[in-house]
Amino acid sequence: MKDYPTAALRNIALLGHGSSGKTSLGEAMLFSSGAITRQGRVEDGSTVSDFEEEEVRRHISLTTSLLPIEWQNHKLNILDTPGYTDFAGEAKGAVRVVEAALIFVDSVAGAEVGTEMTWAYCNERNLPRLVLVNKMDRENANFTRALDSLSSTFSVNFVPLQLPIGSQATFEGIVDLIAMKARKGPRGEVADIPANLQDEVAEARLKLMEAAAEGDDELIMKYLDGQELTDDEIRRGLRLAICRNSLVPVLCAAGAANIGITALLDALIAFVPSPADVEPEAAKNAATQTEEKIAPNGSSTLGALVFKTTADPFVGKLTYFRVFGGTLVSDSRVFNANKNAEERIGQLYVMRGKEQIALASIKAGDIGVVAKLSATATGDTLCDKAHPITLAPTTYPPALVSIAIEPKTAADSAKMGPTLSRLVEEDPTLHWFNDPSTKQTVLEGLGDSHIDVAVRHAKAKFGVDLVSVPRRIPYRETITRSFTAMHRHKKQTGGSGQFGEVHMRVEPTRGQGYEFAWEVFGGSVSSSYQTSIEKGVKSVMENGAIAGYPIVDVKVAITDGKEHAVDSKPMAFEIAGREAFKKAMHGAGPVLLEPIMKVAVVVPEHNMGDVLGDINTRRAHVQGMDQSAGRSVITALVPLAEMQHYAADLRSITQGRGIFSMEFDHYQEVPAHAAQVIIEQAQKDHPQLKIADSD
């Protein structure tokens, strides 16, 4: 692969709704540019982009793939992203490292849920974008209808750069409204504009010229003077307007049929800003904690952001990075400012799907890959040790769905923790932790499919078999009133026996946590047994007294007891303390506490009533309702137990347009009827929760 200057680079993310044809069009780009000799098909699992086993099996993209394309002495780094909501983290990672997005719209469906979602990601970074109306060869394809759906969905000035020649089965090419020529067939052969399109083309050309003129003060003056703009002036005005996000150009193509691809490649080079055209990247100096700017050129200080990490079964860990400033060189050393660790850089690569293309260096503005970095993870910055800086990492969406997972075999058990950590390293939208209150390993993600893919990856990539089980809610136990109880532990089996008697009082502390007090006077129990008694109490605190959940907000006061000169031992008092505490808990009005989540739900206004009705069935306390950018925002406090399957339910109610986030807020008492069911089931499953009789 040739060495390209920063000004000849174009970094573009392919975004859009699932199945809008991003992968097929990326394949057509590779084929048209000569990078591959045969155009693969998603249905056959033969595309360059979808190379992972799960992608081939499901016929959808699950991760972002890098497709470098050489065209007209330029290099286009095309990032093909998944379109499904469960894998939104991949799209967000790609948006962070590009200068523009190509947003796909199906010619039949028009703007869809995924279109709105990815549009919002671009808005977060004020990213210039182009729209491609794809699959123009589909039955019922309609360019005008798709354009109208965009205009009704987004308050943006959409301006066609091209018009289709025919549609559905008769789609054969496009009309370039700047060059005023037709581009037909897979090769984009130049031809005259068909006679039946002349009037439509003339009208569209006029609108295009007006939009271009508005992009530049000099051009608008010329246009208002009645002079016609040249083709180069139209391109200049459009490029300026696109970079400022004052208009969005619209193109059309049929990716799988390879029609309109060469014209699209030309447009991307002409209108997408290069890394040299954008503002210098903001960075923080790790030594002085001051803000600075990293200029996109080779003489600037080195700053490379890691935006993706994968595990290759043959090479090991692959780290994808975007160089924002300076030059990264093979066989060198760099500094990871986030981990305060030095890394050795081996051979640098550019990835084309899973193919590795070796390069001596990666310049400012380019995207590359390096293998086997030890400390570096997604979101880290690679820089010069003498000038340590950090770049802002990607902000990923929060996890919405969680399941409990278990190893299938004992052999899998030993490898489960490291495997989950490697999965999270690959995908920052996954999270896992051990829940001490339920004694389960919990895996969190963006949706059921997301977690299912992660579990399958654990088996396929790392050879670890995991099974999912229902997640138990991390309830807590506490008491509502004071109570006094005692337990005598006496055991005589010949020889030295065991004896210990403990009297205690328990009191609720309500938010003050656990407290242990020694109120024994007169020496009836030696204070040397205090530690043993408390050990018995704490064992119940950890494992629960009524339903097997940790006990919180309780004061335990030891008030009296008895000991035996020969038979009393620490173990006897530990048992007596444990059982006395169980009895005291049962008599002190025990209740279950459940985690309450603060939930924010954002939905289209017309779904407000249905969503509000649904959330009220979940024992929610609605805190407020608001309007923001034409959408309704509901904030509520909802028990975690009622939110286990909310992600799927919300998507169903809103046709995928609703989103939500939630975070832990506080614990509150479970209603008595619900608590009774939980307690009865727990005591059935765990007989040890029942109180032992006194001797």
Image (cartoon, rainbow, N blue to C red):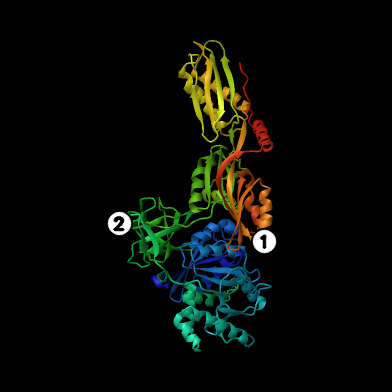
Q: Nearer the viewer, residue 266 or 361?
A: 266
Q: Is there any visible trace of residue 603 in the rendered image?
A: yes
Q: Residue furthest left?
A: 386
Q: Is residue 547 above or below residue 441?
A: above
Q: How many numbered discs sit on the rendered protein?
A: 2
Mark 2 Cα within 10 Å, few/some/many (few <14, many 20+)?
few
Q: Please give the residue where the numbered disc 2 appears in the rendered image.
A: 386
Three-letter amino acid code of the residue under disc 1: His
Three-letter amino acid code of the residue under disc 2: Ala
Q: Residue at x 49, y 62 (%)?
A: 94
Question: Callout 2: helix, strand or loop?
Answer: loop
Q: Which of the 4 image quarters holds residue 607? A: bottom right
Q: Position of residue 218 (x, y in %)?
A: 44, 82
Label of residue 606 in the image:
1
Q: For the residues labelled 2 and 1, say whether their Cβ atoms are less than 8 Å apart.
A: no
Label of residue 86 in the image:
none
Q: Which of the 4 image quarters holds residue 87? A: bottom right
Q: Position of residue 300 (x, y in %)?
A: 33, 65
Q: Is residue 316 left or right of residue 157?
A: left
Q: Nearer the viewer, residue 416 or 31?
A: 416
> From the viewer's perspective, is the residue at label 2 or at label 1 nearer?
1
Q: Position of residue 337 (x, y in %)?
A: 37, 53
Q: Tell me the quadrant of the picture where the C terminus can be found.
A: top right
Q: Nearer the viewer, residue 227 or 313?
A: 227
Q: Nearer the viewer, residue 279 or 216?
A: 216
Question: Callout 1: helix, strand or loop?
Answer: helix
Mark 1 Cα within 10 Å, few/some/many (few <14, many 20+)?
few
Q: Position of residue 85 (x, y in %)?
A: 59, 58
Q: Is residue 649 left or right of residue 77?
A: right
Disc 2/disc 1 C-alpha distance (Å) = 56 Å
